[in-house]
Each structure stands twice: as C-alpha cells, then as structure tokens.
C-alpha cells in the first residue's frame, strides 16, 4: 500500500535507520518472536525494550550481543528482577532483564555481595575488567523474575552516555514483519469550552471499518464539529506469525494534506517516561484498559518524540468548510495503515457552565483547602488546566474520616500532590497506624496510598486523585509455611513461605537459620519467599528458623520453628 509522503520525510526516516545499524548478534539462539515491542504503552511509561518469547519456559541461554564488560548488575523483587547490563565499545549498552540466573562467575559474586549486605535486593557496579564477555558468549539464563507477567527475556539497547533506550527494531535483528497496524477505535476530543462534535462537548468514541484501503468511521464518514478539536487512535501492531499485541512506531496526523503533528518512537528518555500519561488518553486506560495515542500535545507534555507539530497538533475547525482528516500509522518496517474521515465546521454552541470548586492552571502551584482537607499541587504537576472537583461524603465502614472526592481518578499527575485529611475522629492509639486510602465505592475495598499522622492530620503524597479517607492498619502480615509442617521439612531441597499484607503492604522480611542471616529470594507477584539449600546450611542436623515480616505500619509477624535437614 502506498500513501502520500514527502521526500524530506522519507529521507529523514531512512537516514535514521541506517545510522543505527550496528552489527549485533541476537541475544537468544531461538527465533526471535516478540511479546511486546519498543514504545508500547504501559502504565506510567513507554516500554523501553522488546520482550522476546521463550516458549513459555525459563532457563533458556541468553547471550551477549557484542563484546563488552558487565557494567551493572541489579537484583530486585520487582521491576526488572535479575538484570544484567553490558557496556560495549560502540557507544551502546545492552540490557537483559527478568533473568532466572546469571552466568556462574557473576552469580557467585552477586551472592557474596547479598550476604555481605544482608539483602536480597542489590544494585552492583563491578569493575570494568571483572566480567568481560565476547559477542555470542552465554551470560545468563532467561527467567520470570521481578514484575514479569510470564517467562520471557526483556531486552534493551541504550546509548551509554545518556542511558536513553533506543528502539531495538531499528537494528539488524531477524524479526519478520509484513503486517500493517490494526486500528480499533477513533476518539474525537472537543478541547475548548466552545468546541463540540455534533453539539456534544464529551469525548466521542467511534468504531472503525476497513474499506477502500483505509479505515473509516462505521456508518458515517462526516462529523459536524466546531472549534479546537483533537483526535486519538486506539491501534495495535502484529508481527508475522504472532498474535501478541504490540504498539505502533510512528503516527502522522494530516488535515487537508497538511501535516499537523507526528511522532516517532526511535529513542526515549527515562526522565520523560511519565509524560506518557499526557500523550495517551489516561481516562480511557483507567476505564477499560484502552491504549490510545493522542494526535495533539497538552501544554504540560514535554515529551521529545514529536517530529513536526503545528499549534501543538490542535486544529481549529471554525471556517465553515469541510476538512479531510488523514491519520497514518506505521511500524518499523514501514507497513502502514490509514484512517480517513471528514469534519464539517459548524457554529459555536453555548454550553452550560460547569460547577466546580476551583480552577487550577497547569503551570502554577495550586492549593485547595477546607477545614478538613488540604490539597497542594506543585507547579507543572498538571498537564493541562482543570476545573477542580471536591465533594464530602459519608464515612465508609472501617474508616476514620468521611470520604472525600479529591477531583477524580481519571486526571493524571506528573508530580505528587500533597494531601492531608483532618483526623479528629481517629483514636489516639491508632495514630501511628493511620494512612490515607482510596475507597472503591463499587467493591467497598480500600487501597493504600500511604501517609502518616502529624499535628492532628493524616498526610500523604500521591500521584492519584480519587475518593479518599483515613483508615488504620493494625493487622500484622500473614505468614504461611509451605515447606514445613509440625517441624517436619516437607521439601528436601528448599524452604518456601507465602507472605502477604492486606493494606499498607510489606516493608521488610528477614530470615535466620541457626541465628545466621540466610538469603531468601522474594517474588511479590507470587507472594513467595524461597531458599534453596546450599553451603550456608549444614546437612544432617536439626536447625532453628526464625522469619520476621514487617509491614509499612510496623505491624510485625514472627514465625519460629525447628526442622531437620
């Protein structure tokens, strides 16, 4: 399929591809099939690499893509889990995450450091000549550690000097893709008080159908509209022979053959990741998980992925004419899809004024305060101006304050807002156990934001708005022994516990065997603590074991037993 291009645009694209063609080896010795790609929309960030399928298994060999030395090793119960960073001489650093195990020399050194620091989670920076690997040499085994949702290899290429991740699909890895992006829905956003679509100021979600080599709105191809209007696209990309939903690489938005805005996901910056909450339709993601790219740029959005933009991608439909809208979507192989429809400019419509408590500007510090609630929002924490919503409700069962509607959960924050709630109904003995929680009216469940009691109020910092109240966490974490019953070891090679906490969350754990600290690996997603017997525990004797688990409100549960091994 051929679409309308400009010579300059094609030249820029292909120049960029050639510039990044380093001769890397693949990180695995199986065909590379992706479960996720670079720039894919995730919660609060763009995906910084590619997720390579490992046939649903752990323990597959992982290889260095180029000569280099290990510059960083990270072990964490969340995030990247077991991760390895290899610095190369060509200006790039490769990253391998969610690993099951490092190569033996690395693994032995890491374990020594964990025992020295008495911590499962470590962040290590070996000397440049300590672990040196050749291109194609095995460095690890693939796994499912950290926040991984299933066995796979998360793989990144970063610029060493800036640590900025670069799109791995711009390099010469053998990944077949002749399939164009699939568009699921179109969104139309009236962006000003006088703007409307079909006399409606609300976001309009439209199903699309494919015909005449383009996607068109189902049932109607022309919309009446007026004023400043933006668009959004819910689209996915498939690679050949693979039904995993990946993200698009590039978008162009045209009005009457004039380029209004575009972005391209060649490179990202970790400092800019959270701006994804402005780039995408945050509300659609919260409501139903939709991953919607906007064609316009909110004033507080500082992402550097945009290539050419006129008036921040916002077109003013106020001239009484019909305008042809074209939105082009591409993957890295330049397979393309097109959305086409028409906006007919109409007349301004007077709408009812919205009743709100305050008007907050995105580029200023904002404060809302009553006798019971204080909300302080830093400068540039909002992506656009908002009409702030506040409402006081009834006290939920189990809470120690009324329920306060602090704006709404569909508005993102780039920086944390400071929130405090008056604690006059909180008993003194619960002050140290108190926190602020979100309350789900539908399920009657609390989810902790955190916070502490101070000067008659419970105070916290939050990236979220929503329905909030004061609660107290007085329950210690739960401990379930999976491998020991009545002082009998039920598994010969390992010891496992399940640990969990219902409200504030687990802060720390510590396990001693025979009064010595022992390394237990923690997997929060499975609520699992696990130790595989090694040289640190002698065989052929009775041992004492003590496990102490503490939550974030200093509630402590202790498990003690004996066992023979």
Image (cartoon, grey):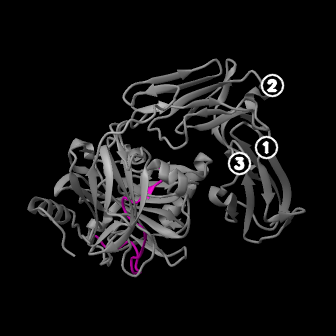
Residue of label 2: 427
Examine the rendered structure and indicate whether residue 352 appears above or below residue 143.
above
Closest to the observer, 352 or 279: 352
The image shows residue 388 at horizontal and vertical percentages of 50, 30
The image shows residue 380 at horizontal and vertical percentages of 39, 31
Residue of label 3: 510
The overriding secondary structure of the stretch rendered in magenta is loop
In the picture, measured across the screen, residue 432 lies left or right of residue 79, that is right
Say if the magenta span includes residue 30: yes
In the picture, measured across the screen, residue 6 lies left or right of residue 484, that is left
Q: Are marks 2 and 1 in contact (CB under 8 Å)?
A: no
Name the element at disc 3.
strand
Alpha carbon distance from label 2 to label 1: 19 Å
The image shows residue 269 at horizontal and vertical percentages of 33, 48
Residue found farthest to the right: 486
Q: Alpha-carbon neighbours of circle 1 within 10 Å: few (<14), some, or many (≥20)?
A: many
Examine the rendered structure and indicate whether residue 30 appears above or below residue 91.
below
Alpha carbon distance from label 3 to label 2: 31 Å
Instruction: Report the residue at 42% width, 36% height from top.
Output: 351
Q: Which residues are magenta?
A: 24-44
Residue of label 1: 476
């Amino acid at each position: 399929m051929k679409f309308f291009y400009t010579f300059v645009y094609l030249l820029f694209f292909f120049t960029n591809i050639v510039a990044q063609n380093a001769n890397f080896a693949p990180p695995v010795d199986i065909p590379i099939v992706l479960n996720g790609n670079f720039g894919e929309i995730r919660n609060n960030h763009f995906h910084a690499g590619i997720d390579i399928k490992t046939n649903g298994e752990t323990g597959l060999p992982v290889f260095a893509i180029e000569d280099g030395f290990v510059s960083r090793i990270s072990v964490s119960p969340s995030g990247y889990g077991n991760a390895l960073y290899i610095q190369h001489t060509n200006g790039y650093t490769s990253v391998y995450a969610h690993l099951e195990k490092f190569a033996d020399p690395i693994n032995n050194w890491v374990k020594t450091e964990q025992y020295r620091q008495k911590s499962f989670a470590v962040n290590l920076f070996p000397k440049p000549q300590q672990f040196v690997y050749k291109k194609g040499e095995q460095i690890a085994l693939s796994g499912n550690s950290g926040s991984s949702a299933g066995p796979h290899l998360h793989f990144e290429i970063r610029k060493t000097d800036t640590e900025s991740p670069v799109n791995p699909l711009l390099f010469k890895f053998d990944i077949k893709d002749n399939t164009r992006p699939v568009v699921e829905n179109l969104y139309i956003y009236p962006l000003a008080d006088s703007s409307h679509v079909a006399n409606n100021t609300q976001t309009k979600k439209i199903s699309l159908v494919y015909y005449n080599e383009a996607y068109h709105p189902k049932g109607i191809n022309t919309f009446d509209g007026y004023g400043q209007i933006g668009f959004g696209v819910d689209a996915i990309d498939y690679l050949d022979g693979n039904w995993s939903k990946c993200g698009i690489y590039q978008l162009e938005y045209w009005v009457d053959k004039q380029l209004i805005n575009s972005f391209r996901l060649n490179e990202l910056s970790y400092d800019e990741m959270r701006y994804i909450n402005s780039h995408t339709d945050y509300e659609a993601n919260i409501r139903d998980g939709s991953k919607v790219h906007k064609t316009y740029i909110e004033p507080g959005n500082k992402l550097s992925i945009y290539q050419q933009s006129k008036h921040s991608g916002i077109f003013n439909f106020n001239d009484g004419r019909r305008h042809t809208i074209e939105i082009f979507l591409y993957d890295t192989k330049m397979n393309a899809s097109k959305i086409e429809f028409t906006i007919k400019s109409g007349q301004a419509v007077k709408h009812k004024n919205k009743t709100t408590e305050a008007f907050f500007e995105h580029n200023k510090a904002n404060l809302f305060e009553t006798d019971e609630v204080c909300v302080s929002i830093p400068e540039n924490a909002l992506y656009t101006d908002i009409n702030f919503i506040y409402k006081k409700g009834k006290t939920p069962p189990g809470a120690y304050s009324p329920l306060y509607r602090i704006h709404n959960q569909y508005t993102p924050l780039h920086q944390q807002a400071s929130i405090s709630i008056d604690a006059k109904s909180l008993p003194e003995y619960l002050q140290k156990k108190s926190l602020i929680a979100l309350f789900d009216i539908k399920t009657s469940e609390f989810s902790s934001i955190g916070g502490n009691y101070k000067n008659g109020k419970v105070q916290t910092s939050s990236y979220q708005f929503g329905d909030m109240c004061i609660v107290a966490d007085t329950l210690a974490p739960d401990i379930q022994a999976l491998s020991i019953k009545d002082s009998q070891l039920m598994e010969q090679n390992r010891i496992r516990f399940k640990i969990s906490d219902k409200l504030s969350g687990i802060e720390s754990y510590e396990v001693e065997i025979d009064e010595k600290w022992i390394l237990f690996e923690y997997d929060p997603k499975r609520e699992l603590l696990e130790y595989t017997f090694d040289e640190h525990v002698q065989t052929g004797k009775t041992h004492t074991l003590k496990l102490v688990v503490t939550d974030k409100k200093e509630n402590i549960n202790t498990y003690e037993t004996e066992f023979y091994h």
